Structure formats: C-alpha cells, structure tokens
Amino acid sequence: EVQVVESGGGSVRPGESLKIHCTASGLPGFPNLGYCMAWFRQSPGKEREEVAHVDSEGVISREVWTEGRFSLSREEGAPNTLTLEINNTKTDDSAVYYCAAGPAAYTRRYTPYCPSYTYWGQGIQVTVSS
C-alpha cells in the first residue's frame, strides 16, 4: 500500500520559519523505478499550485516566486523523503500543503522529468498569523 505522509506544519507568526516533512512508502518499483516528489499548496479560494519538486536524480526545481524563502531537501540516503523549509513566512503562505510522488519520465537522452503525480498525501495545514 502506498502511503504519503506529511508532518510538521502548524501555526507560526510572520517572519518565523517552519519545516514540513514528507515520507512516501510502498511506491511500486522503488527504488529501481525513479520517482519525483513535490510539494504543492492550496489556499482558500485559490487553485492548488506547485511549490517545488525534486526529480529522480535529486535535481530540485522551484517556482520563481519561492526564491529566497523556500528550500527543499531530502534526508541523506532517503530519496523517499522531502522536507520543505519556509523562511521569513508571510500571511500569504497560509495554506494546506500537500506532498506528492509520481514515477519519473525520461527524455531520449535519459534526462528525467516529472510529468505528473500519482500519489498524494492528505495535506497539512500551515497558518501564518500574528
């Protein structure tokens, strides 16, 4: 059974930092089959948006608006984990954050990319408020 489990989160004040963690287990074919993992978020009344992802070779890609405040990392030796750190939090960062995993795809030159995400966590609430 595939499980994608988020942890951490909670409430912080603007300007504080926060980490949320994700662990995916039971991924079919893992680790021989490469997987991408990503963080998304959704605020009330807004569409879900991707924050950042890591491909099967550990290359991290972040949305432009995350520059300078969001960082992505994995536990050493554990490519099925993903941690998102948010620094200098803002009230607009308040959202439900979702972790997702999906099989990596490869170009003709065997460069991995992440076309979609098959497995999703339940989501975890992050609230930034004074």
Image (cartoon, rainbow, N blue to C red):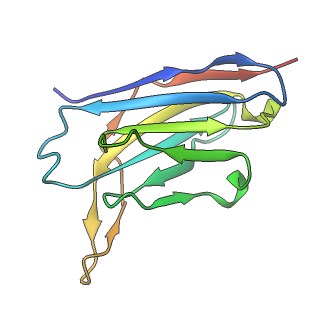
Q: Is residue 89 left or right of residue 50?
A: right
Q: Quadrant of residue 25?
A: top left
Identify the image quadrant of the C terminus: top right
At x 39% / y 38%, what residue is drawn? 75
Q: Is residue 76 left or right of residue 69?
A: left
Q: How many marks?
A: 0
At x 39% / y 28%, what residue is drawn? 121
Percent of width and height locating residue 82:
43, 39
Percent of width and height locating residue 76:
36, 42
Residue 42 lies, with reference to residue 29, above or below; the image says above
Q: Quadrant of residue 65?
A: bottom right
Residue 40 lies, with reference to residue 115, above or below; the image says above
Q: Is residue 79 left or right of residue 98?
A: left
Percent of width and height locating residue 118:
30, 44
Percent of width and height locating residue 35:
27, 51
Residue sitting farthest toward the right:
130
At x 61% / y 37%, what residue is drawn? 85
Residue sitting farthest toward the bottom:
109
Identify the image quadrant of the N terminus: top left
At x 71% / y 56%, what residue is drawn? 67
